[in-house]
Image: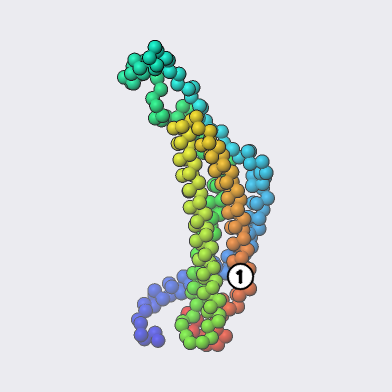
Amino acid sequence: MTSLLKVDQELKNKVDCFRERITSEAEDLVASFFPTKLLELDGFLTEPDLNIQDLTQIHAEMNLPVPDPIILTNSHDGIDMQHVKKRKLDEDGDGLCGTKVFVMPNGMLKSNRKLVEIIEKVKPEIRTLIEKCNTVKMWVQLLIPRIEDGNNFGVSIQEETVAELRTVESEAASYLDQISRYYITRAKLVSKIAKYPHVEDYRRTVTEIDEKEYISLRLIISELRNQYVTLHDMILKNIEKIKRPRSCNADALY
C-alpha cells in the first residue's frame, strides 16, 4: 500500500509526532481536565453573583436625563411664529435642536457593569470548551480506521462521538453570538432613549434586556458544565470502542 504513494520519511515522522501529541493531550483532557472543569463550573454556579433573586439589583442607572418640555407661547392668532422662526435661524443660540443628539449630556453612557463582569468571566470558559472539544475531536478522527466492509460497529461509535463534539462546538460558538447580540440590541435601545427621552417604554425595555441577559448567562454556564459532563461520560463509556473500533484486523488502524 505504501508503494502507491511516496511519502517523505521526515514529514511522516513529524506527522507521527503530531499524532502522539494530540493523543496524549486528548486523553489527559478526557481523564482529568473535563471532570475538573465541570466541578469548577458547578462551583461557579453557586457564587452570589449568579444567584440574585431580586433582578432589580442588576439594573444599571440610565444616565440620560429627561429634558424639560418645550413651552410654546401663544399670540393673538395662535403660536408665536416669529419666535419659532427666530429659534430656527439662531444656530449659535442655546435653544433646543429637535431630537438630534450630538453628545450625551453626562458623558459616555456606560454598559451594565454587573453584567459585563459576568460576561468577561464566561467568555474565556466558552473559548476553552471550543478549543478542548476541537482537540478531542481530532483525536477521535485520527483513531478512525480505513474504510472496510463489515465490522464497523466501533467505527459508528467513533463517528457519533465526533458528531457530538462538533455539536458542542457549534453550540458554544452560538453563545458568543448571543453575547454580541445583547450588546448590539442594548446599544440600539439606548440610542432610542437618547433620541426619545420622554418615552418610558424604551427605558423599561433596557432593564428587561438586562434581566434576560442575566438569566441567559446563568443558563450558558449551566450548559457549559452539562456539556463537560456529557462528553466525559460518553467517551468513558465507549472508550474501548473509540480506541479499538475493530476487534480484529488491528493493523487497519491508522
The image shows residue 199 at horizontal and vertical percentages of 50, 32
Q: Which residue in the structure is indicated by mark 1?
A: 234
Could you tell me if residue 192 is visible in this image? yes
Residue farthest along the top direction in this orientation: 76
Q: Quick check: 143 left or right of 96?
A: right
Q: Which residue does the image show at 49% across and 84% down from the upper left? A: 252
Mark 1 Cα shell of 10 Å, populated few (<14), some (14-19), many (≥20): few
Asked if residue 53 is positioned above or below residue 8 in the image, the reply reads above
Asked if residue 145 is positioned above or below residue 106 in the image, the reply reads below
Location of residue 1 by image quarter = bottom left
Viewer-side residue, 66 vs 21: 66
Could you tell me if residue 118 is visible in this image? no
Q: Which residue does the image show at 46% across and 36% down from the upper left? A: 192
The image shows residue 228 at horizontal and vertical percentages of 60, 62
Residue farthest along the front direction in this orientation: 77
The image shows residue 47 at horizontal and vertical percentages of 66, 48
Q: Which amino acid does label 1 sit on?
A: Met
Q: Which residue does the image show at 46% across and 70% down from the upper left? A: 18
The image shows residue 196 at horizontal and vertical percentages of 46, 32
Viewer-side residue, 84 vs 48: 84
Q: Is mark 1 on a helix, strand or loop?
A: helix
Residue farthest along the left direction in this orientation: 89
Asked if residue 67 is positioned above or below residue 22 in the image, the reply reads above
